[in-house]
Image (cartoon, rainbow, N blue to C red):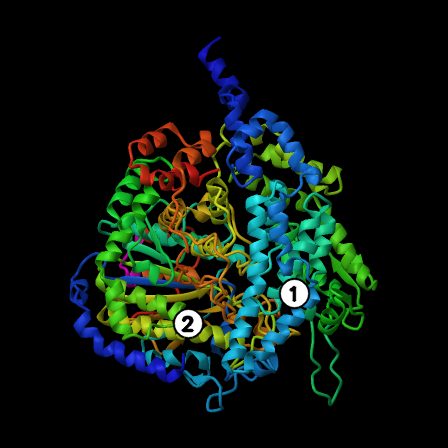
Amino acid sequence: MQRRDFMQSMALGTSLLLPVGRSAWAATGDSPTRQKLVVIMLRGAVDGMNVVAPVGDANYRVLRPTIGLDKPGVENGALDLDGYFGLHPALAPLLPLWQQKKLAFVHASGSPDATRSHFDAQDYMESATPGRKNTPDGWMNRLVSALPGTSTPSRALSIGPVMPRILSGPSTAINLPNGPAATRPDLLDRPAIGAAFDQLYAGHERFGRAYQDGRSAHKQVMEAGVSKEMMAADNGAPLPYGFPDDAARLATLMRNDPKIQIAFVALGGWDTHANQGAGTGQLANRLAPLGQGLAILAQRLGPVFDDTTVVVMSEFGRTARQNGNAGTDHGHGNAMWLLGGKVAGGKVYGDWQGVGDAALNEGRDLPVTTDFRSVLAQVAEKHLRLPDRQLSQLFPAMPQKEAGFELYRG
Amino acid sequence: MTLRALACIALLFPLQLLAAPVPADQQALHVLNRIAYGPKPGDIERVTAMGVRKYIDSQLDPSSLLYPPELDARLDAIGALKRPAGDMLAEFTELRREVRDEEEGARKRRQQGVGAMSLQTSQARVLRAIDSPRQLEEVMVDFWFNHFNVFFDKGEVRPLVASYERDAIRPYVFGRFRDMLGATAKHPAMLYYLDNYLSSAAPMQQPNKPKPRGGLNENYARELMELHTLGVNSGYSQKDVTELARMLTGWTYDKKALMRDNETFRFDPKRHDRGVKLWLGRQVGDEGQAEGEYALDVLAMHPATARHISYKLAQYFVQDEPPKALVERMARTWLDTSGNLRSVLRTLLTSEEFMASDSVGAKFKTPYQFVISAARASATPVVNVTPLLNAMSGLGMPLYGCQTPDGYKNTQEAWLNPDALSRRISFASQLAEGRLPLALAPAAPAESMGGNMMMASTPASAPAPAPAPAAPPVRLDSALLGATLGPAISSRTQGVIAASPENLRAALLLGSPDFMQR
């Protein structure tokens, strides 16, 4: 999509917000599901040092002579955040949120476990028990059961054809397919077919529950009238298939169905071992739809964005030095992103020690100075208002309880 | 005997005491579900008559099983099956050159050409999976491709996938693991996918000269140990990853020589790191390509590899949590036979654990297994595989479309979710009602060449509007389908179906809870 089309669609979205956001006000009542959480996981280890780049560090371009971002002011250079850090230019759609102080980053954060295996590291980030592989459930699933109030099937949802580890467990969570099929009628909506299959799956020991959850969720989604509203908002020019489109659908769904409280989306393709590019190129091409989608999510959530925190995280960071192929290999610390109406944004948090050779972990990557769980714990405690007792069940055996900074205003 | 003594014996011999014998037709179904993609009409009777043991033997050594002439004819018509890797890559490169040409004709040629390449590869895979009498061979091709996964939407992988499967996977599925390991390590699809083709010794910087290009890339070395052989947490360190990467520097291909002469692999001594390496406690000197070969030798016969892959096989064929004793026996066979995969499979398939009653139906079908087994049971002649490929994509398992090197999982936990069941039921209903355009010649495929820009949230092939079937849809005969599936359908399900309208019965069979498992 061209930048101009995108800006137009943003503008259109704004003008349509009030007339079609019919149940937006219902969601702002003080219900137990009022405070929302959206987690976006970047599978494959996004290069956090080029997302929030330490362009003010003298060693940055020494480590990354060809893939490092140029300083602000140069074409395709970083976008200035605070005079030291610069945002990747492909994330320009997020700059307004930074300026409104609704976007923050926690740098040099991540899992204390030293693994550089994508699959183990993702597992640990989703179970929130680094180093322990046999944790049966994901932390977002534990969160569902810890939150006050009764749950409906759609309280926790994932966008995508498979149920992610992070939402797996005893509490009900549903998943919706990517793309417009998520909010369209399906064959089981035909009464005769639906009735026959309902009977076939009723009380079935192994699959009965998944079947029933799927049907209830589908019904709830259909009632939210998302499909019609999406078409109106798109004004005949639907967003390209992919994250921006899914983000728009998720936002509309969350605004229209106040019972949805936590949501998860995973995006892949960040494992940039070769030719990752700098201000433009491979990584830029992946970041662009992510930035667009997040901006659309924030914007189409409308008033609900005030009560929402969006967390973007990835299993580990990448090597501080570029490798022999203008790419980066598996590293350690990364940046977590936080967006939301009440996030104390406009700031890069964390115990940042620079990227001088001596500051690097094992001489190759960023250290983890903030445990990702301490960030999530603050989101759960301050934003979702989870009591202490529940917190220790959500993140068992967490060594670093306090992040050492306040991510929320007031 | 006291109750307590009985309980003790039950604990000691749980299998023998508690497992009811599996009836012969159930056994036939079980074996068809596991070493084949489920029964076709008449299969259960055929396997029951010949005996499961004999069926397993014939599948383990399938050289005498010939393709039916129709399958041969269809495969003959698929050009990609026979074309050398270099030839395909040359065409792909030519097509991509036209990317810059925005003239409408050029765009269309590119889309059709690039789309046709992967469609042909997928078509051959799916037609064989449905119709090959060497079913276990097809099951193993899928298993090993997935084990040594490459992603068709990364750069130059797409035109190389056909050759990768044909030349690096298929010939070795009943052979030695070391041979398959070597063939994948040297195939340009893998060299490209995990970046080893770029990896070279860290260059020396000369004073007053620009920093030279090139250097180490650890991607392949890490996944080689973590995924292809030893398994994660088997005791190697970050240092071992780097050292192995150094040993493998220079393992590459020359794109021009590949396109011109089909030279699929080249060891480039200029790229090779000639220093001494210390890898897994072994000192490795300057021995050129032999260093990498040595690494593959060590890895292929490492006990951790034997255990890691035996576990994966047992999980695939027996249970999501496979019995430990079985995995140990398989690993022993591995080490005793120098990694002979036929022998390891024989240990697995002739084990008590494989035929145990608590293993029957215990596996939840992956989307691939679900779609292929439905096509087999339906006995619908398939010319156009696109609706089947779309179903796999919609269920989260696009063929050749797994982006990450770990491949797809095959457990219930990975694939059972609320949306999956609704989608499987929709697919089953369309198939049962004859509404999938399977008999049509495939239409020009929609281009899904996102290059490297693909996001995982986008299925590899976006849903394309299905062309209208030429003939009025013909519903599957539910009585025939019921007979094909035999004991797969429980009496409870049979009861509900018998009480349902006739026009829904075939859909209910293929969309039943019973058909979701294998």
The numbered mark at residue B70 is: none
Kindly identify which residue carries mark 2: A290
Q: Considering depth in this image, is B253 or B372 the residue closer to the camera?
A: B372
Q: Tell us which disc is closer to us: 1 or 2.
A: 2
Count of all numbered marks drawn on residues in the image: 2
The numbered mark at residue B218 is: 1
CB-based contact (under 8 Å), mark 1 and mark 2: no
- The reply to whether residue A353 is in sight is no
Q: Position of residue A19 (x, y in %)?
A: 17, 73
To which chain does the residue with label 2 belong? A
Q: Position of residue B109 (x, y in %)?
A: 55, 74
Q: Position of residue B2 (x, y in %)?
A: 46, 10
- Say few, some or many: other residues with alpha carbon within 10 Å of mark 2 (under 14 / 14 to 19 / 20 or more): many
To which chain does the residue with label 1 belong? B
Q: Position of residue A269 (x, y in %)?
A: 51, 66
Figure check: B275 above or below B493:
below
Figure check: B405 above or below B140:
below
Q: Are marks 1 and 2 on the same chain?
A: no
**Residue type at tag 1:** Glu
A335 displayed left or right of A174: right
B163 displayed left or right of B292: left
Q: Name which residue lies at 22% across and 62% down.
A: A225
**Residue type at tag 2:** Leu
Could you give the CA–CA distance between mark 1 and mark 2, rounded to whole angstroms?
27 Å
Figure check: B48 above or below A78:
above
- Say few, some or many: other residues with alpha carbon within 10 Å of mark 1 (under 14 / 14 to 19 / 20 or more): many
Q: Which residues are magenta?
A: A381-388
Task: Tell me if residue B181 is in the magenta stretch.
Answer: no
Q: Quadrant of residue A140?
A: bottom left
